[in-house]
Image: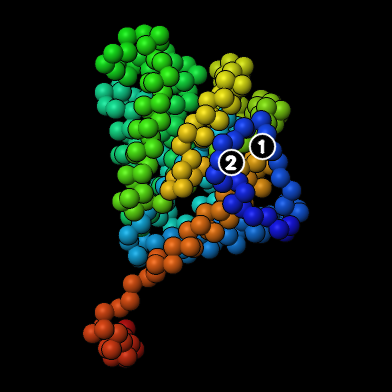
Amino acid sequence: MKHKDLQEFKVRSRILLSDLKTTTDLGLNEDELKDLLEDTREDLGEWQDTLYAYGKYSVLICLQGMDTAGKDSLIREVFKDFNTRGVVVHSFKVPTHKELKHDFLWRHYLALPERGKFGVFNRTHYENVLVTRVHPEYILNENLPGIENVSDLGEDFWERRFEQIRNFEEHLVRNGTIIFKFFLNISKEEQRQRILRRLDKPNKNWKFSPGDLKERELWQEYQRCYEDAINRTSTENAPWYVIPSDEKPVARYLVAKILYEVLTRYKEVQEPELAPEIRKNLDEYREQLKQEKN
């Protein structure tokens, strides 16, 4: 593989999405990428077992991207070798009536991973500064004090919401959650091709909605809102990574490798040692089991 500093995808300063590539050359063919992904996800699965035994951290992985960016298939391929009890995936849809009775972060708190586990948010709390910003009328469903119509949603409203998100994430980090935020960056042309494939393949038709085309017309507005959200909320403790995603195998490998590279820096995450009184009697326990009769 060509030398690639994976931290180049980490957002450390202000970005312009229009300047960032949606493809990257790793110098690997598809079979090589598949083999590397398999090795990396096995390593991640083993690390998750150790994380569970250690029991002091949880890992939250947030996936965002335009429709067809590849979130579902990435989750399937990257976490395939995890113990199924060690990773929980939540896909956030339109808020329910009950969820709208609470603040916008409430349902995300409920879905957070326990210590020792991975949680994956397929679409995330950022929908509350993305979809709602492109369609501000949705905010009216939250029935917020002082917000009677869209004209009440000034820049100060969005800045407060970004501040609430930053505080939410900082609170999680301080209490043992390791946060990754990935934006799967695809081109408008690649999205067009993927939507066409949905239409051309009968077994993929169910994924298509005419609303997809209406949202596609708002591409530039979504890009502007994503760019602003990333710039306002990428912090050292909860960074954003912008992943070139026109090629799904590349995106999957990059996400898996970044996860493994960062997580293995937590050297304190180790399996606990046996208590001395148990360790000194291991030979005795072993012999006892050997002498058992069926």
Report x, y in % for residue 99. Answer: 30, 27
The residue singled out by tag 2 in the image is 242
Q: Which mark is residue 292?
A: none
- Left-right relation of 212 to 267: right
Q: Where, by quadrant of the figure, is residue 274 drawn?
A: bottom left
- Left-right relation of 87 to 12: left
The secondary element bearing badge 2 is classed as strand
Report x, y in % for residue 33. Answer: 68, 54
Please tell me how many numbered marks the rendered image carries: 2
Crowd class of label 2 (few under 14; some 14 to 19; many from 20; radius 10 Å) = many
The reply to whether residue 243 is in sight is yes
Colour mode of the rendering: rainbow
- Left-right relation of 115 to 120: left
Which residue type carries mark 2? Val
**Relative to 13, residue 207 above or below:** above
Q: Look at the numbered discs 1 and 2 and tell me whether their residues touch, using CB distance below 8 Å.
A: yes
**Relative to 258, residue 231 above or below:** above
Q: Where, by quadrant of the figure, is residue 41 drawn?
A: bottom right
Report x, y in % for residue 129. Answer: 44, 26
For the N terminus, the image quarter is bottom right
The residue singled out by tag 1 in the image is 20
